[in-house]
């Protein structure tokens, strides 16, 4: 399937809910027409499933667009990068006959996420959990890496080739005393050396590279990670991630000026999921929640945790559209609702509660439908409701897992 490129030269795909909306599929389809695919923020807390040579892999750091061999892949300054995970992902691609290293560009300003950040993440989570305030992080060290960055004690990719032995030993002592963890400074140093050997030439001034590409008329696809409601400022704080997941955060994380930005495509599931703690007004538990989870395969791709499931909440989409300036929607996983007799949709929020509208289900398979006209009337009505309540067109509709199972309007 090929979606014609009527998109602007700098286009972004941003999640409108709590992540796991299925952004990867649209990115995979769009990337064909883009010269660069760029990730701006976050780290190995993200997870997208990519099928390579018939085998499924979950990638955490490399963007979903990485399989397109013509595309340059950028890991931006806003990211926190766990190098052993990155090397593993590069290795998986290499096993499948794809050498990504020559086209991989890593910002010298991105921060290195060390194993000790993961350890600290675990310690902090356990401390919070004791008082019932656990966030349910992915334990990939994201919060502690951004803590170091904000405290100006982080180590950036530009230092990758330096001798950091002494510095790491000092950190090991400090962190041991502060968190009661054992840091293997020698192992951390060894991991850096392994990374230098493979990635030494990939670490560059990615911001200038992106500007050079924009000046040369090349097309850049910004791949958002996590999603708007997990944003450190605009999300459901404190149950959020530690980076800026909105379009503004993406531009900041890549060093692209707003004047270059064209379309922002908001991505939302036809229902809603969340991993970890925090508010979820349209959550459904019991049989219905279980059914959505099973039909949608709603288990965390990084942590394998069962995702909390519930219904679409349009005020969230409106808020995300407002913050990100979305031009249109990609509504994903419509087919997951195929067996529902009634589909509740949150259309308003009153006194901290969702006001639900009950839509009639279509009770027939939409899997693989590729034209809007072929959708059952009730499914068309649901899409029309989303368009009416958000004031934005639904331009892409996911109708299954496969690449070609998508309606593009
Ligand atoms: P952290 O990003 O690992 O610190 O986790 C903070 C919160 O964000 C937790 O509720 C995680 O489950 C959630 N989270 C982080 N990354 C993702 C993602 O890519 N998809 C869905 N939830 C995520």
Image: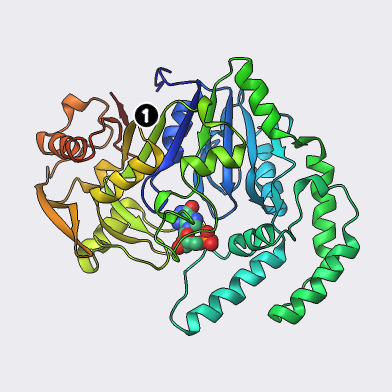
Nearer-the-camera pick, 377 or 98: 377
Can residue 304 be seen at all in this image of the molecule? no
Relative side of 327 to 23, left or right: left
Q: How is the image coloured?
A: rainbow
Residue reaching furthest to the bottom: 130
Question: Relative to the observer, which residue lies in front, 293 or 382?
Answer: 382
Quadrant (top left/top right/bottom left/bottom right) for the C terminus: top left
For the point 67% across and 39% down, which residue is it?
95
Percent position of residue 145, x then y: 65, 60
Q: Residue at x 73, y 58 (%)?
A: 154
User: Residue at horizontal 21%, vertical 47%?
Assistant: 337
Quadrant (top left, top right, bottom left, bottom right) of the N terminus: top left
At x 45% / y 77%, what residue is drawn? 133
Is 273 above or below relative to 134?
above
Percent coordinates x, y for residue 168 in the rendering: 83, 65
How far across and down, in percent of the image, does residue 161 sit?
A: 87, 47
Looking at the image, how many numbered discs can be counted on the residues? 1
Label 1, residues with CA under 10 Å away: few <14, some 14-19, many ≥20: some
* Secondary structure of residue under mark 1: loop
Q: Nearer the viewer, residue 378 or 152?
A: 152
Q: Which residue is mark 1?
A: 404
Position of 360 with respect to 261 (left or right) is left
The residue most toward the top is 217
């Amino acid at each position: 399937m090929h979606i014609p490129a009527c998109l602007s030269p700098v286009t972004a795909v941003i999640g409108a809910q709590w992540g796991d909306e299925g952004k990867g599929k649209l990115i995979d389809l769009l990337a064909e027409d883009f010269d660069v695919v760029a990730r701006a923020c976050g780290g190995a807390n993200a997870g997208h499933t990519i099928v390579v040579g018939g085998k499924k892999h979950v990638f955490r750091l490399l963007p979903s667009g990485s399989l397109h061999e013509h595309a340059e892949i950028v890991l931006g300054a806003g990211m926190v990068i766990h190098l052993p995970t990155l090397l593993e992902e590069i290795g998986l691609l290499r096993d499948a006959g794809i050498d990504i290293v020559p086209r991989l560009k890593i910002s010298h300003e991105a921060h290195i996420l060390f194993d000790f950040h993961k350890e600290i993440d675990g310690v902090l989570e356990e401390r919070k959990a004791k008082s019932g305030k656990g966030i349910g992080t992915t334990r990939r060290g994201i919060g502690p890496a951004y803590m170091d960055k904000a405290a100006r004690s982080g180590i950036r990719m530009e230092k990758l080739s330096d001798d950091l032995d002494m510095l790491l030993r000092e950190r090991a002592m400090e962190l041991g005393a502060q968190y009661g963890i054992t840091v293997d400074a020698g192992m951390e140093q060894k991991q850096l050396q392994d990374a230098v050997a493979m990635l030494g030439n990939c670490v560059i001034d990615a911001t200038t590279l992106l500007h050079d590409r924009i000046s040369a008329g090349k097309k850049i696809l910004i791949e958002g990670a996590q999603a708007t409601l997990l944003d450190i400022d605009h999300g459901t704080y404190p149950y959020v991630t530690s980076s800026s997941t909105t379009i503004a955060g993406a531009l900041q994380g890549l060093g692209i000026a707003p004047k270059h930005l064209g379309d922002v495509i908001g991505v939302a599931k036809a229902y809603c999921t969340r991993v970890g703690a925090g508010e979820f007004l349209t959550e459904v538990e019991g049989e219905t929640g279980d059914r959505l989870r099973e039909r949608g395969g709603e288990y965390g791709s990084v942590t394998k945790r069962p995702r909390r499931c519930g219904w679409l909440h349009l005020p969230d989409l409106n808020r995300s559209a407002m913050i990100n300036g979305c031009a249109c929607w990609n509504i994903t996983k419509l087919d997951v609702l195929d067996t529902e007799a009634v589909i509740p949709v949150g259309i308003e929020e009153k006194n901290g509660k969702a006001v639900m509208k009950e839509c009639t289900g279509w009770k027939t398979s939409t899997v693989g439908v590729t034209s809007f006209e072929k959708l059952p009337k009730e499914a068309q009505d649901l899409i029309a409701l989303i368009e009416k309540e958000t004031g934005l067109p639904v331009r892409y509709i996911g109708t299954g897992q496969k690449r070609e199972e998508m309606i593009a309007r």
